[in-house]
Image (cartoon, grey):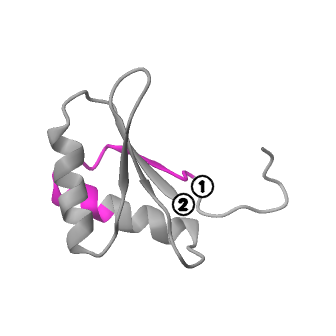
Amino acid sequence: MAVVDFDNDDLELPKKFMNQAFRWGLPGYIEKSKSKGFYIWFFFEIDMIAWKAQRILLHLLQKISQPNTEVFPKQDYIDSSTSF
């Protein structure tokens, strides 16, 4: 699972991102944030390493000129020192 967090109430950016993701075969789901903006959720059918999901989504964000948009997970990996 990975999430892109658009902190703007303009739906055009998330729609533009979704179009780009769809071209790459990545179906996502848009959710309206409670405070402001939108989340786009991606659920992968295979085990996806966190850093790969990040890189893919960051690449797509660059394609729509939004490279500073927040992407989750933020960690590249989880090890024994990671707590929740």
Residue 64 occupies quadrant:
bottom left
Circle 1 sits in a helix, a strand or a loop, which is it?
loop
Indicate whether 37 appears above or below 28. above
Q: Is residue 16 magenta?
A: no
What residue is disc 1 on? 75
Q: Is 45 or 58 nearer to us in this picture?
A: 45
**Number of callouts in the render?**
2
What amino acid does circle 2 point to? Met
Examine the rendered structure and indicate whether residue 20 appears above or below residue 66.
Answer: below
Mark toward the start of the polypeptide (1 vs 2) = 2
Q: Horizontal and vertical percent for residue 58?
A: 34, 59
Q: Position of residue 46 (x, y in %)?
A: 56, 79
Residue at the spot x=26%, y=62% of the render?
60
Residue beneath disc 2: 1
Query: What stretch of residues is rendered in magenta?
Result: 59-74
On the image, the x and y values in percent for residue 80 come to 85, 60
Label 2 Cα neighbours within 10 Å, binned few <14 / some 14-19 / many ≥20: some
Q: Residue at x 26, y 29 (%)?
A: 8
Quadrant in which the C terminus appears: top right
Please tell me how crowded label 1 is: few (under 14), some (14-19), or many (20+) other residues with Cα within 10 Å. few
Give the number of the mark in front: 1 or 2: 2
Please check the rendered image and state whether residue 71 is part of the magenta-colored stretch, yes or no.
Answer: yes
- Left or right: 16 in relation to 7: left
Q: Is residue 59 above or below residue 72?
A: below
Disc 1 + disc 2, Cβ < 8 Å: no
Q: Above or below — where is 45 with respect to 10?
A: below
Residue 19 place in picture, x, y as percent: 18, 60
Amino acid carrying mark 1 in the image: Gln
The residue lying at 23 percent from left, 54 percent from top is 17
**Mark on residue 8?**
none
Distance Cα–Cα, label 1 vs label 2:
13 Å
Q: Is residue 10 left or right of residue 78?
A: left
